[in-house]
Image (cartoon, grey):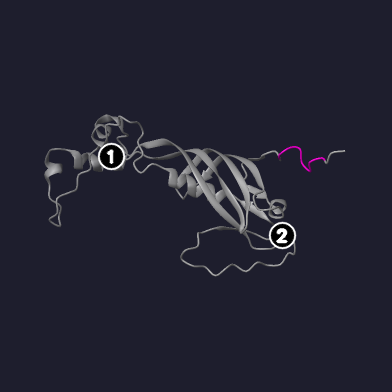
Amino acid sequence: MANQPTSRFAPKPARLSNDTTIHVAQLLQEVVGAARQARVALDGLPLDEDALARGVEAEIKLTRIPAGILAAGEVAATVTVPCIRCLEDAAVPVRTDFADEYRPTVDVMSGAEISPEEANEHEAEYFTIGGDHVLDLRESLRQAIILGLPMAPLCREDCPGLAEAVDGAGDPDDGRLAVLGRLLDGGEAGDAVADDGRKPARRTGS
């Protein structure tokens, strides 16, 4: 009788809903090259004090490597940031790849603490896996989304910029636009000289 394969089917992808943690004790015990798939869906992910990524979705492959686990994949989200031209909020879609290394701090077989290798300038940065053998993808996703944001976000491609926003498109009670309106005005405010002798700077849409 022919030998039966130890596993006829690949493990099903882990599906994480509003969670970024995966227990990886079993994967840490497998041979180098063993892999698992994971799918993450988050309603929101804070990027910093002011920015929030919404509708976060990620497809991730966890691969056993000699030093630990490599988490690599693609993440997509929508982030609300100020438009670089008119300063109004713009919902910017982000889709980007990432790959981060995670290293255990406790040996999964013996339970002994693993001393971190002496760092050197040529060694890549990595995240750690705690004694509970749980890998948390949150920081990987957060950093990937931030790095995936455009350098010059726009609310729309044909955004007219600050001048038109001040002339009527913006909120008249918005103090930012009131100040910008004075600076953009071609009359007395635009040509005035500040008390310290410097001419006020002008910002215009590109």
- The magenta-colored residue range is 4-10
Residue 126 sits in quarter: bottom right
The mark that comes first in sequence, 2 or 1, is 2
Residue at x-position 68% and y-position 61%: 131
Specify few, some or many for label 1: CA neighbours under 10 Å numbering under 14, 14-19, or 20 or more. many
Q: Secondary structure at mark 2?
A: loop
Residue 100 x/y as whole percent:
54, 52
Q: Is residue 189 left or right of residue 137?
A: left
Residue 38 x/y as whole percent:
63, 42
Query: Which amino acid does the dot numbered 1 rest on?
Result: Leu
Q: Residue furthest right?
A: 1
Q: Are marks 2 and 1 in contact (CB under 8 Å)?
A: no
Query: Which amino acid does the dot numbered 2 rest on?
Result: Val
4 or 94, nearer to the observer:
4
Residue 20 x/y as whole percent:
61, 46
Disc number for residue 177: 1
Quadrant for the N terminus in the image: top right
Residue 78 x/y as whole percent:
47, 37
Residue at x-position 74% and y-position 37%: 9
For the question of whether residue 166 can be seen, the reply is yes
84 or 126, nearer to the observer:
126
Residue at x-position 33% and y-position 31%: 157
- Residue identifier under label 2: 108
Q: Secondary structure at mark 1?
A: helix
Tell me the mark number nearer the camera, choosing from 2 and 1. 2
106 or 50, nearer to the observer:
106
Residue 180 sits in quarter: top left
User: Is residue 7 highlighted in magenta?
Assistant: yes
